[in-house]
Image (tube, grey):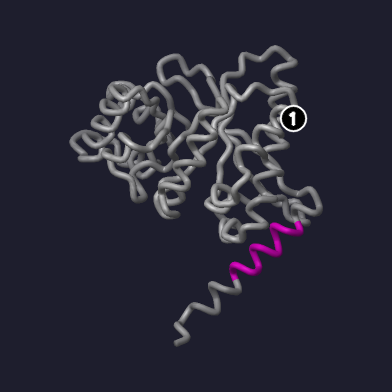
């Protein structure tokens, strides 16, 4: 039975797939970099590479506006390949210039993880650019990891980690994960979602949850990054809670 809104959703997805496919063909997909900083010294220790699409008119569109396109396996693979190649080139330039580069994170989609040859693709791109994998972090959202059959994707991620890559679990607290998953999910970094950062104020339950996650992660040897920091007060509170790293 046809449901209200279904036609609109299908149309929106096809339009996104068409737009991103055209942007890829015309080299209008670009990597923008958001700094990750130490909250105590404000020293930049890394970046997250964010996909941005430039429209024919010159406007810059964030990934949230073309996320539907990443549900198409072919477009998702092409988009990730494009981002990996740009990030590898940029990192090589930064290393050649002697910058104290620690790591850059690249986002992966469900289609990337289900594709089969992801580890080989990533290793090849960075090897060709002469960038050691110790500088690379792959970021996977909770919904991607736990929404696609768990074990197979877990195996894929274990392969990535065995190659020297680090893995970050992104948007923690918004998807299917619970703290018990940290015992079985092979991740190096947890990124606490912006929705928790937004609620950081005295006596808000979000602060207790964030503090608990930070404490457990530290005991498991997992680093924590707080996302969506917009105010100095948030950074100060996160530092008090034991969170060393953040991004805006």
In the rendered image, is residue 233 in sight? yes
The magenta-colored residue range is 12-22
- Rendered image quadrant of residue 193: top left
In the rendered image, is residue 248 in sight? no
- Rendered image quadrant of residue 134: top right
Residue in view at x 20 percent, y 40 percent:
205
Q: Residue furthest left?
A: 203
Front residue of this view, candidates 246 and 22 = 22
Residue in view at x 28 percent, y 32 percent:
213
Front residue of this view, candidates 58 and 10 = 10
Residue in view at x 71 percent, y 33 percent:
124
Which secondary structure, mark 1? helix
Q: Residue furthest right?
A: 26
- Please tell me how crowded label 1 is: few (under 14), some (14-19), or many (20+) other residues with Cα within 10 Å: some
Q: Is residue 172 above or below residue 47?
A: below
Please identify the dominant SS of the magenta region.
helix
Residue in view at x 43 percent, y 36 percent:
227
Compared across the picture, whether 212 is left or right of 80 comes to left
**Is 20 in the magenta?**
yes
**Whole-percent x and y of residue 165?**
55, 28
Q: Quadrant of the N terminus?
A: bottom left
Instruction: Give the number of callouts.
Output: 1
- Residue bearing the label numbered 1: 89
Q: Is residue 199 above or below residue 44?
A: below
**Whole-percent x and y of residue 225?**
42, 30
Front residue of this view, candidates 157 and 90 = 157
Compared across the picture, whether 100 is left or right of 176 comes to right
**Whole-percent x and y of residue 32?**
64, 37
**Is 153 in the magenta?**
no
Compared across the picture, whether 2 is left or right of 60 comes to left
**Whole-percent x and y of residue 216?**
26, 28
């Amino acid at each position: 039975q046809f449901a209200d809104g279904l036609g609109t959703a299908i149309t929106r997805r096809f339009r996104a797939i068409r737009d991103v496919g055209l942007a890829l063909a015309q080299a209008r997909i670009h990597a923008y970099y958001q700094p990750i900083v130490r909250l105590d010294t404000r020293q930049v220790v890394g970046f997250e590479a964010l996909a941005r699409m430039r429209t024919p008119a010159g406007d810059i569109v964030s990934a949230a506006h073309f996320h539907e396109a990443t549900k198409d396996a072919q477009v998702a693979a092409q988009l990730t390949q494009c981002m990996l190649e740009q990030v590898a080139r940029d990192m090589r330039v930064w290393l050649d210039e002697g910058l104290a580069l620690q790591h850059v994170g690249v986002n992966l989609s469900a289609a990337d993880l289900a594709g089969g040859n992801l580890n080989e693709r990533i290793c090849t791109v960075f090897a060709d650019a002469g960038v050691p994998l110790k500088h690379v972090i792959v970021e996977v959202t909770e919904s991607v990891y736990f929404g696609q059959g768990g074990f197979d994707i877990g195996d894929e991620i274990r392969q990535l980690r065995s190659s020297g890559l680090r893995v970050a679990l992104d948007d923690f607290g918004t998807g299917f994960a619970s703290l018990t998953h940290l015992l079985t999910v092979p991740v190096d970094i947890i990124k606490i979602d912006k929705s928790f950062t937004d609620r950081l104020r005295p006596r808000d339950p979000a602060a207790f949850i964030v503090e608990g996650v930070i404490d457990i992660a530290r005991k498991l040897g997992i680093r924590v990054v707080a996302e969506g920091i917009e105010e100095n007060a948030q950074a100060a509170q996160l530092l008090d809670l034991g969170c060393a790293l953040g991004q805006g």
